[in-house]
Image (cartoon, helix red, strand yellow):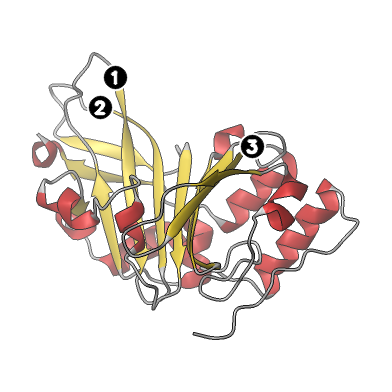
Amino acid sequence: MDTPTPFLVPSGLNEENYLDWLFSLNNETCKLPCWWGIEPESTNFSTLDPVMAPLGLRELGHRESMPDGIIPSGFSNSNNSFGNVSGVFWFWEQVYQGIKVVLEPSSSTGGGLSFIQTHYELKPILIEYGMPSRVLVGLIADAPEPTTTWVYEIWVFYDDKGMGLNCRGPYDLPTSTDHAIRVCLNRLDLIFLYLQSPNGLRDFVEYQFGEELGIEYLLEHQFLRPWEEVTGLSVAEFYSMFSRDNNDCFDSPRELWQ
């Protein structure tokens, strides 16, 4: 591992200038899985305050360490133009190993909303980082309670980069006469970013629910299915559809999810 580096925040920045500084980081020196100047397996600092405080984010404290010694530390806010931002950092021996970030575009405004739309929604991720290594989809055809909508999940992985993107939003449940479920990814409520060094200590998706419940379990029980099975299209076609084409929607056979 490279020698850990301290995280340095310029002094005297108000929120607007701080956002500009974060924008410049993402545009120049801090590509994912680096997040807002924090580089997994490189950045070393004992508190999240230097980067979190200028945005109104606050550390929620450290939880018990994992069996391998990794310690999770949560953070959240609801005080600025980024809207509701929360997540977890995992660190080991004072060095940050991985990050889970939860963003709510629907609660963001102004520069914060523009920043999320420009950097963290599906299309800009695809344009910036290219074709993903795999894509998974989670849907249902029949809700367990009376309702006309449900929540889709789209998982997009860049395994060689240590990145996972999970987008969630509403879709209309099919009627009794519909043969397909239509999902439109421009209906977006939540974005989950899972970030770590490509050679990190643990599989970042294992932390999804705060316990070792991995993607393999969800696939085995068919809560998630590969994009190819769901649509009959390849990952390359997914990339083309949602990065270059003016297309926000896809269909999946209803019977697949019953």
Q: Quadrant of the C terminus?
A: top left
Q: Residue furthest bottom?
A: 2
What mark, if any, has residue 100 been given in the picture?
none
What mark, if any, has residue 148 been given in the picture?
1
Is 95 left or right of 147, judged from the image as shown? Answer: right
- First reached walking from the N terminus: tag 2 or tag 1: 1
Is 14 left or right of 174, judged from the image as shown? Answer: right
Q: Residue 146: x, y in percent?
A: 24, 13
| Mark 2, residue position | 173
Q: Nearer the viewer, residue 233 or 229?
A: 229
Q: Residue 226: x, y in percent?
A: 20, 57
Query: Do residues under tags 2 and 1 come within 8 Å of each other at their CB atoms?
Result: yes
Q: Nearer the viewer, residue 37 or 1?
A: 1
Residue 216: which quarter of the image? bottom left
| Mark 3, residue position | 83
Q: Nearer the viewer, mark 2 or mark 3?
A: 3
Identify the residue shown where x is 61% and y is 66%. Answer: 38
Q: Residue furthest top?
A: 146
Q: Nearer the viewer, mark 3 or mark 1?
A: 3
